[in-house]
Structure formats: structure tokens, C-alpha cells
Image: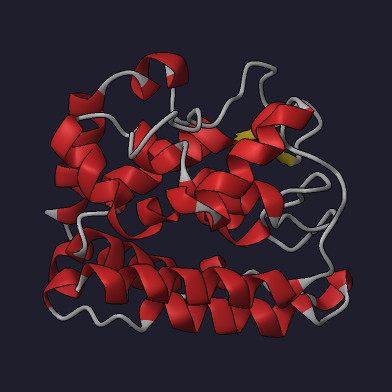
Amino acid sequence: MAHVAGSFLLQLALQVEHLLPQDNATVLCSPGDEARAEYWAFGHGHWTMKEGCAVAHRKKDFAYWSSTWAAGLTALKGSPSYKDPAIHTADGVYIFDAEFCTVNGFLDLPNKAQLLQNYSAIMEMEERACNSEPLQSLSASAHTSALREAVAMFNAEGEKDAAIRGAPFLETGVLERVNAEHCTKRRYSCMIHFCLNNFCKLSDGRVGQGCQCRKDFRLMPVPTSGRV
């Protein structure tokens, strides 16, 4: 089941790549960070695509998700500046997750630095959200189609001119269904931490990512031997 879930996430990520041409603007802080991103996204570290969130829960350390495959892939596959009714991104930002994080309100959470270091607090946020309506009812009947449907909507909107482009996560029920799918897979908390760790609102109102948000942004180091 983990392999199927991981493959599904990769398929979705590759579909989102085609929203817009990739941009050369980097969200990484140094040239050496690109090698880390390649390792986690496409090298031996890609096991974290399938298992990173589960390991994060086991070790009570969300870095196994938010600083490995998820961070590496989105850092390497960003798009030129993108605008719709929900967001305006800087160059190089991975727009699907940027909009997911923004519309959920995760980028507006207070005490971000402290929250990033507090596994229990983020788990409490997951429990409150996933055990409340509408996510509780939606999770009970959730199917693995919500993310796929959201990606299809982004693909369609990405082909439109910015002046007439819609924001899929502002459409009725779309965000709730995606969140319910994350709840069902116990991935909601991992996504909160990923959003806080990788995205931010810049001073000019655009959404930034990685080094655009803070100059000490780093992915998890490549292990010298075996798995981390």
C-alpha cells in the first residue's frame, strides 16, 4: 500500500510539472543544495516519497517529510511567477503546494519558528481539524481521487490567461476533499509542517519558497551510508 501511495504522489507531482514551463529561478540557498534536492527527489533518498511521513511520525520529527522528498521535488520543479485569485507566487515556486498552503491559512499561523520545532502541537492541529466537520465526515468516505481532481483543475486553469484564471482551491469543496484525503492517510500534520518549513508570504504579498523565505533554508543532508 505504501508503494501505491508513493507512486500516486509522484504521478501527481509530475502532472503538476506541466502546468507551466519550469523556471530557472532557484529557491535553494547554495549550489550544494541542488545535489541534496536531486538525492531526495530522484536518487536513493526518494524512499521518503513513500515512507517519509510515516517515519516522521515514528521518530516524531517532521523533517523526514518536509526536508526530504517533498522539499527536494518542489524546489527543483518550480514555475515562473504565477497568479490567480488565491495567490501570486515569486519565480521558481511550486504553485500547487503554494496555493494549498496559502488557502489553508497555514502561512498565516503565528509563532511559526516555535511551531516548526513542536511535533506535539502540530499533531494537535491535525487531530482538531480531522476530527471536526466537515473533514471528519469527508474522511469517512474519502477516496484517493481528491488530489487527482485538484491537479486536473490546476492543469486546466494553468493554460488560461492570468486575467481569467480561476483558483481551484477556492472552488467549493475542493480544499476540504483534499484535506480529508490527507487526514485519511495521516498526512495532514506532515503537510502543515511542510507548508511552514517551505513556503511563506513575502513582504510584497507574493508567496515565496525555500531560500526566498529564509537564508538558512536547508534540506536534510545526504546520509554518508544507508538510510538516515
Q: Residue 90 at x, y = what percent? A: 80, 44
Q: Total number of numbered labels? A: 0
Does 193 sit left or right of 18 as displayed? left
- Assign the C terminus to one quadrant of the image: top left
Q: Nearer the viewer, residue 158 or 133?
A: 158
- Inspect this view and state whether residue 161 appears: yes
Q: Residue at x 34, y 38 (%)?
A: 226
Q: Residue at x 32, y 48 (%)?
A: 52
Q: Residue 140 at x, y = what percent? A: 11, 74
Q: Residue at x 45, y 55 (%)?
A: 46
- Inspect this view and state whether residue 173 appears: no
Q: Residue 64 at x, y = what percent? A: 35, 38
Q: Please say if 174 is above or below 197.
A: below
Does 64 sit left or right of 204 as displayed? left
Q: Residue at x 23, y 26 (%)?
A: 119
Q: Nearer the viewer, residue 155 or 227?
A: 227
Q: Quadrant of residue 94?
A: bottom right
- Assign the N terminus to one quadrant of the image: bottom left
Q: Please say if 138 is above or below 225.
A: below
Q: Residue 214 at x, y = what percent? A: 66, 20
Q: How is the image coloured?
A: secondary structure
Q: Please say if 11 is above or below 34.
A: below
Q: Nearer the viewer, residue 89 or 77?
A: 77
